[in-house]
Amino acid sequence: MVPQSKRTQYDLQDLGDPVDRPLCVTREREMSPILCSQDCEPGAGLPGGRFLTQVERGLHVETHCLENHSGQLDSSTCLTSKVKAILDAAQKPSTKRSYVYKWACYSKFIVGKGFDPINAPISAVLDFLVSLSDSGLSLSSLKCYLAAIAWYRRKEGLPSLFSDHLVKLFLRGFGNVRPTVAPITPSWSLEVVLSSLQSSPYNPMATCEISYLTWKTAFLVAITSARRVSEICALRSDEPYLRFHKDKVILHTGISFLPKVTSRFHMSQEIVLPAFFQSPTTSLERGLHMLDVRRALAFYLSRTKDVRKTPRLFVKYRRDSCSLPVSSQRLSSWVVSVIKLAYHKSGRELPNGVKGHSTRAVSTTAAFWKGVPLDAICRAATWSTPSTFVTNYKLDLMAKKDAEFGRAVLFSAVA
């Protein structure tokens, strides 16, 4: 006698043509309740018809929670609210605001193409970058937009856009088509601007319009500190963050401020600004005394003391927003306004592309050509290595003098 098999017997007529597996059953069969525990829920099984035990189900649910869209483990989808809050603190508020704006621009473009912003294909993302390049944005700006998009996609468990091979090729090709060219010579003359600050409408500082006093003080702080406008905006006007000495003034940012690079070298560095010709005796010295940043700060604090509503050093001066903290963009526009007014007063044509950030390159280059040691320049501008200055900020102030030789040769034609 042949014992009967205990395996499930199938009617061969119910078997269909195989599609993606050896056999496929055309209609479902009921599963025996013996194979399912009493707390078995619909959909709790695994592919292949096997159901999970309680231990297996707990492990599977935890693993499923850690899987991202590519099938790889990802812990971002199982984080608690407290952990997510700490992770969000990795971005500065200014970065968050920037990302929100860039994500809104990207979403508007992608939705118009009929895609979901989170799950849009890489080709659509690259089309968005092309639209940005057509509007004149540089490679660094495209990378900022790409970082914002990658941040929102990463929060949904998607892999980083910067690791995609098409994105890498696009950025490399864009850099070859439109290479970034650093300026060789200054876009504006520091001599012209400093000469303008020695006269009206910036003087006398006790009675000039508060707008001109604010512009002058902001420009002098920017040019003598070589710091970013975001750091200048974070300076405070109260003790112990601001201390006046006989020959200098020392400033600090608030303890909550995070610089662009949050290393020990860049954190909580004091800014030391010098007094300049405090006891002038000649007309030349009296003119240079008008550029004393310590004196300008003293006048500025005195004239804003009664209306100040914030401990931040620089405040708005318009009546509708008087004495509120100023943004980095507004302070940068003050610096540019000083440059524009100087060129207007001198009757010169304003160069193209004048930006507030250019004060870092102009001031550090001027100090370098005056013989200031390179390590002192890097410490003042918070550059941890001299290569940052040499590669991105050092300008050729001797270009005009170098041309004097060739100009003298050509003047032989009029001899």
Image (cartoon, rainbow, N blue to C red):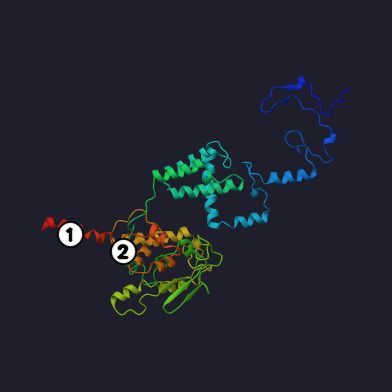
Q: CA distance from mark 2 to mark 1?
A: 25 Å
Furthest toward the top, the residue is 13
If the image is split into quadrants, where does the C terminus sit? bottom left
Above or below 88: residue 257: below
Q: Residues within 10 Å of mark 2 (few under 14, many from 20)?
A: some
Give the residue displayed 43% in from the left and 79% down from the top.
Answer: 246
Furthest toward the front, the residue is 1
Q: Nearer the viewer, residue 70 or 101?
A: 70
If the image is split into quadrants, where does the N terminus sit? top right
Quadrant of res 291:
bottom left
Amino acid carrying mark 1 in the image: Ala
Amino acid carrying mark 2 in the image: Val
Furthest toward the left, the residue is 415
**Res 364 seen here:** yes
Q: Picture coordinates of residue 313 (x, y %)? A: 49, 68
Quadrant of res 118:
top right
Q: Is 31 on the left or on the right of 279, as rendered?
A: right
To which residue does mark 2 refer? 192
Give the residue displayed 87% in from the left and 23% down from the top.
Answer: 2
Q: Secondary structure at mark 2?
A: helix
Q: Nearer the viewer, residue 345 or 95?
A: 95
Q: Picture coordinates of residue 409 (x, y %)? A: 16, 57
The image's mark for residue 408 is 1
Q: Is 144 on the left or on the right of 410, as rendered?
A: right
Give the residue displayed 74% in from the left and 22% down from the top.
Answer: 15
Q: Nearer the viewer, residue 119 or 71?
A: 71
Compare marks 2 and 1 and give the one earlier in the sequence: 2
